[in-house]
Image (cartoon, rainbow, N blue to C red):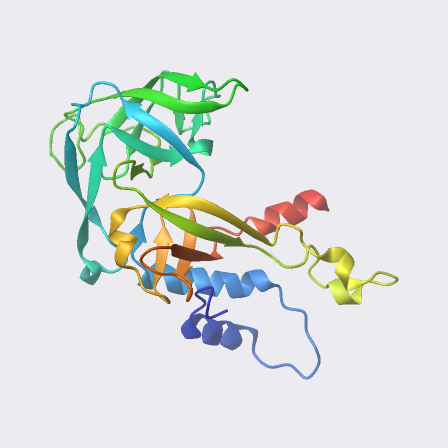
Amino acid sequence: MRRRGYTPESIRNFADTIGIAKRDNLIDVSLLEFHVRENLNKTTPRVMGVLNPLKVVITNYPEGQEEWLEAENSPEDESLGFRQVPFSKEFYIEKDDFKEEANKKFFRLKLGGEVRLKNAYIIKAESCTKDTDGNIVEVQCTYDPKSKSGSGTPESLRRVKGTLHWVSVPHAIPAEIRLYDRLFTHESPDTQKDKDFMEFINPSSLEIITGYVEPSLKEAVPGERFQFQRMGYFCVDKESSKETLIFNRTVGLRDSWAKIQQKND
């Protein structure tokens, strides 16, 4: 639990919540995860990491230009201050954040649609490129140079419904991301009659992928905790180094497991 980023405060708060009983009780692990989220939300800096990258190119952005944008580290703790994040013509977003066609409830990027890039500009998707199997490998966009966050221009105050996180391609740092999930698919696997608890092992309890993180994380040390914006809370693993960054997922931003269980039931 320590290696995944669970804090002593969150465990103590969990223990205080459940109290003491004279008989055995089954406590849903989502209650522990709630306290972890609550504690980490107040104490961890926000950063940007893309776990399932899709390349985006801004066709009307000057070739070879780059900017360093100011980003708030935490809205919960002003003492954490600000950091500089690089922006360029090419960057990564999450694959799930783009669709060629989508309904009105899809507030992320789609062809002909606009979104704001966190701390940066408003972009509009114009076209996309696919490989021989029909998979989208690149999205071409245009940007509004007057829409820079915090610039005070009318364009920068324009509201769009979606805001995406991103990582500049030339500055992206590759990282091994270990996505931990529930070990069992049932809340009480050892109490099911005529069934071995091993039948309830979750085959997706650990997924290891390669993602990209912003360059401010290059100096991250083992044990440091961060919130990857829109993705969840992550902790630097003890095997991590400057040459090979490794992040363990502590918990997601929301309890998605409850929805999965309800669907299965």
Residue 143 against residue 69 in the figure, above or below: above
Q: Residue at x 21, y 60 (%)?
A: 80
Residue 203 against residue 112 in the figure, above or below: below
Q: Residue at x 18, y 28 (%)?
A: 147
Can you see residue 198?
yes
Q: Nearer the viewer, residue 10 or 214?
A: 214
Count up the numbered dots.
0
Task: Give the left or right position of residue 255, taking residue 196 as reference.
Answer: left
Q: Position of residue 101 (x, y in %)?
A: 47, 18
Residue 232 against residue 128 in the figure, above or below: below
Task: Give the left or right position of residue 153, taking residue 211 as reference.
Answer: left
Q: Position of residue 38 (x, y in %)?
A: 41, 62
Q: Quadrant of residue 19?
A: bottom right
Task: Give the left or right position of residue 159, taking residue 195 as reference.
Answer: left
Q: Residue at x 42, y 32 (%)?
A: 97
Q: Position of residue 67 (x, y in %)?
A: 15, 36
In the rendered image, the residue lying farthest to the right is 194
In the rendered image, the residue lying farthest to the bottom is 22
In the rendered image, the residue lying farthest to the left is 152
Task: Give the left or right position of residue 35, taking residue 148 as reference.
Answer: right
Residue 23 against residue 261 in the figure, above or below: below
Can you see residue 120?
no
Q: Nearer the viewer, residue 72 or 31?
A: 72
Q: Position of residue 46 (x, y in %)?
A: 30, 52
Q: Nearer the viewer, residue 246 or 43?
A: 246
Q: Residue at x 68, y 73 (%)?
A: 25
In the rendered image, the residue lying farthest to the front is 243
